[in-house]
């Protein structure tokens, strides 16, 4: 049997972290077993589905590298097929029209709640011989078995058994003819020969209903694997404040796609103690049995750390291309400045994201005015003659990191001060910052001309 998995998001919003992880697990399982990964867009929620959301899903998957073999398929383009199966169930007395109005259903619900009962459809039209009321568009309901039980051998959660008496007759087609989720997803999985349904465990309650529909159609059952949800670091449902934002937002915040993929894979799945691994290793190692039955907690600090590990080993030319848009937002243009790939190489081990990398690179491409307190603290009357003399020396030396360092060291010795007494004021003059890489490395990249211009311009700020 060929493994065929699918990712089936509803286009009612962006591709979020939970959905991306589900897609990743489905993708990895298909790739591990040489199978097919299918993308299906479940767009039957006509009020909330948007083209913008569809594009956000496609963009998010493309950025993460979750390539699909078939699709995207759209449910609203398959209405004729759903109606065909619905008619089959109706003819086989496995479905029926229900004419209960919205008001009647609400009254039924209120009465059940008042009696301490679980709200559910009471089957009033299941075998009714009443004449249908005029002017009411009926829904089509499934005749769920009233006896027996449904057993799910879940690949993650284990054996789950639900009595059919706990399930009511769910709606297959709404009054406007649009199928419900529980009906369309069954027909789609059947038609697309899905062998393994890997999805969030918020669907566990839907699975017995879907299995009963498949059984009514004498269809083979897929394997089910319900992945526990992702919680915030505080143990509560993941919110925007704790990371539940669009996958594309992570790109805009400066994360690498391979780092986010690595982090998502480790949210509830593990391979020994491995923390950093490639997509190829993920595919080689991935197995549903290694997914935890407990919810995973989203840890932003861990994601930062993983992203940092990837930044360190990422090719400088690629990082430079990724940094340019972030620098542009900071009104920095790299033309005419130092080689951005070399700047990236100097800075990348000091940052967690590409956005931070861009922030750290700003002073290479435009001068930053030091804060007044930094000027007061470091640009003192004592330092002024030392740095003025250093400017003169810098005019004549070979412009290499080694020569720059040697000249700073000589100046400290000649004026009988410790090296930081020169290095820190120099750093403030040239970068406007306190924390930078070694100042000799910074000056080498910045270049002699730009260094001297900034030093001379800053001399007037020294205290008298």
Image: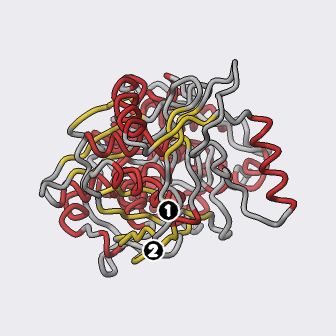
Answer above or below: position of 62 versus 377: above
Q: Secondary structure at mark 1?
A: loop
Earlier along the polypeptide chain: callout 2 or callout 1?
A: 2
Q: Secondary structure at mark 2?
A: strand
Regarding residue 88, the answer to whether it shows in the image is yes
Residue 460, position as x, y percentages in the image: 71, 35
Residue 461, position as x, y percentages in the image: 73, 38
**Residue located 53% across and 70% down the image:** 295
Q: Residue extending furthest bottom?
A: 272
Quadrant for the C terminus in the image: top right
**Residue located 56% across and 60% down the image:** 167
Number of marks in the rendered image: 2
Q: Residues within 10 Å of mark 2 (few under 14, many from 20)?
A: few
**Residue located 30% across and 76% down the image:** 271
Q: Residue extending furthest right?
A: 114
**Residue annotated with mark 1:** 204
**Residue located 59% across and 64% down the image:** 231
Quadrant for the N terminus in the image: bottom left
Report the side of 185 relative to 376 (left or right). left
Residue placed most toward the observer, 339 or 144: 144
Report the side of 395 relative to 240 (left or right). left
Residue placed most toward the observer, 199 or 424: 199
Report the side of 96 relative to 335 (left or right). right
**Residue annotated with mark 2:** 160
Residue placed most toward the observer, 358 or 62: 62
Name which quarter of the figure residue 396 lies in: top left
Answer above or below: position of 133 versus 413: above
């Amino acid at each position: 049997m060929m493994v065929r998995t699918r990712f089936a998001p509803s286009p009612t919003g962006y591709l979020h972290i939970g959905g991306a992880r589900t897609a990743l697990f489905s993708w990895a399982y298909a790739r591990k077993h040489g199978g097919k990964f299918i993308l299906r867009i479940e767009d039957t929620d006509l009020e909330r589905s948007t083209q913008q959301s569809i594009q956000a899903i496609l963009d998010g998957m493309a950025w993460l590298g979750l390539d699909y073999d078939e699709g995207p398929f759209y449910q609203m383009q398959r209405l004729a097929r759903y109606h065909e199966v619905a008619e089959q169930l109706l003819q086989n007395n496995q479905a029926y029209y229900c004419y209960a109005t919205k008001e009647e259903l609400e009254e039924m619900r209120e009465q059940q709640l008042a009696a301490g009962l679980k709200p559910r459809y009471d089957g009033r039209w299941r075998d009714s011989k009443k004449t249908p009321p005029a002017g009411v568009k009926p829904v089509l309901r499934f005749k769920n078995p009233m006896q027996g039980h449904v057993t799910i051998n879940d690949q993650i959660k284990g054996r789950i058994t639900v009595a059919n008496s706990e399930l009511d007759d769910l709606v297959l087609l709404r009054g406007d003819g649009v199928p419900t989720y529980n009906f369309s997803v069954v027909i789609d999985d059947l038609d697309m020969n899905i062998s393994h349904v890997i999805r969030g465990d918020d669907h566990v309650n839907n699975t017995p209903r879907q299995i009963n529909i498949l059984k009514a159609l004498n269809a083979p059952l897929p394997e089910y694997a319900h992945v526990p949800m992702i919680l915030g670091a505080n143990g509560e449902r993941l919110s925007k404040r704790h990371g539940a934002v669009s996958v594309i937002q992570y790109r805009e915040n400066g994360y690498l796609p391979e780092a986010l993929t690595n982090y998502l894979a480790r949210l509830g799945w593990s391979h020994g103690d491995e923390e950093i691994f490639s997509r190829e290793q993920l595919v080689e190692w991935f197995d549903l049995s290694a997914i935890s039955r407990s919810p995973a907690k989203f840890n932003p600090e861990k994601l930062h750390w993983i992203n940092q590990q990837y930044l360190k080993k990422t090719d400088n030319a690629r990082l430079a291309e990724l940094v340019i848009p972030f620098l542009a937002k900071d009104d920095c243009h790299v033309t005419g400045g130092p080689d951005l790939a070399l700047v990236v190489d100097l800075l990348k081990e000091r940052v967690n994201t590409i956005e931070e990398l861009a922030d750290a690179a700003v002073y290479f491409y435009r001068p930053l005015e030091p804060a007044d307190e930094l000027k007061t603290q470091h640009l003192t009357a004592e330092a002024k003659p030392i740095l003025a003399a250093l400017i003169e020396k810098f005019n004549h030396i070979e412009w290499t990191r080694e020569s720059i360092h040697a000249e700073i060291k000589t100046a400290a010795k000649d004026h009988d001060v410790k090296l930081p007494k020169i290095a820190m004021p120099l750093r403030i003059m040239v970068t406007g910052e306190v924390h930078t890489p070694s100042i000799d490395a910074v000056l080498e990249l910045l270049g002699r001309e730009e260094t001297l211009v900034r030093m001379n311009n800053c001399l007037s700020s020294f205290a008298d």
